[in-house]
Image (cartoon, helix red, strand yellow):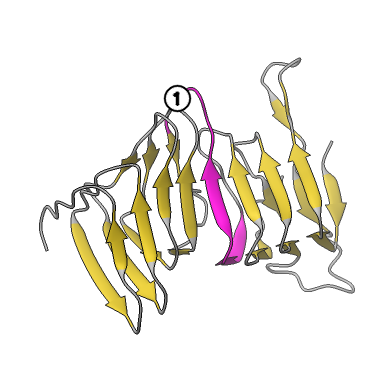
Amino acid sequence: EQFKAVKFIIRTGTLLQKLDTSVSPNFCASLSFNTETTFYPSGAFGDFIIENGATFISECSDKIIARSISGSVSANLFDLQSGGELLLLGSSPQIETANFQLNGKVTFRKTSGTQSYPTSASPLTFHDLEIQGSQNVTLPPTLSVTGNMSKVGAGSFLTNSSHITFTGNHDQTISGFPLSPMDLTVNKSDGKVILEQSLSVLRN
């Protein structure tokens, strides 16, 4: 069943959002927010926070969080704080939220199919990104990265139709794969972008 509140905070440890494969179609217990509009606003509402040292693992693809699952109303904020980790096991994970703050680590760990970034509201800025699974991950057309990108699984980042921007004021390491974006921008106030393998920019 859906789990509903006005705010979710993962302070420590791991929260696992499981996919129920005993029913057809498979069902995921979504995390959603109060829809009462007498006391709360009628639009985007509800914060989901993953704090430093905490981990959220989701096996879901459809609507990992939302304000209203049936009405497709967005949550207000998905906040992955520095030192927190989000592990995505679904093939096309969807996080219905008006605002993303992804200052922690986003990890892809799917072992079948092709993974892509959330399609319902695509975040444009990430900190650390990692592939641990065996499937490829399709990057969005525009992506800013403030931390590291790494590939430790068999899957690859599909970057040849993406404009990637590296930004921030500290060193960033790209490891485990050759980087081949359509366009590349390095806009850093300090620090370096360190590539462990080759770089091939296809256009600009």
Task: Say whether residue 171 is left or right of residue 14.
Answer: left
Q: Nearer the viewer, residue 196 or 58?
A: 196
Coordinates of residue 118 in the picture (x, y in percent): 51, 48
Residue at the location (10% across, 57% down)? 203
Residue at the location (85% across, 51% down)? 4
Please check the rendered image and state whether residue 106 is part of the magenta-colored stretch, yes or no: yes
Residue lying farthest to the bottom in this orientation: 189
Residue at the location (89% across, 72% down)? 38
Q: Residues within 10 Å of mark 1 (few under 14, many from 20)?
A: few
In this rendering, the answer to whether 139 lies above or below 51 is above
Q: Which residue is mark 1?
A: 113
Residue at the location (77% across, 37% down)? 29
Coordinates of residue 131 in the picture (x, y in percent): 46, 40
State which region is magenta: 96-114
Coordinates of residue 41 in the picture (x, y in percent): 77, 74
For the residue marked with disc 1, what is the amino acid? Gly
Residue lying farthest to the left in this orientation: 203
Coordinates of residue 90 in the picture (x, y in percent): 57, 34
Quadrant in the picture for the C terminus: bottom left
Task: Say whether residue 81 is left or right of residue 126.
Answer: right
Q: Is residue 122 visible?
A: no
Task: Say whether residue 117 is left or right of residue 75.
Answer: left
In this rendering, the answer to whether 142 lies above or below 25 is below
Please check the rendered image and state whether residue 108 is part of the magenta-colored stretch, yes or no: yes
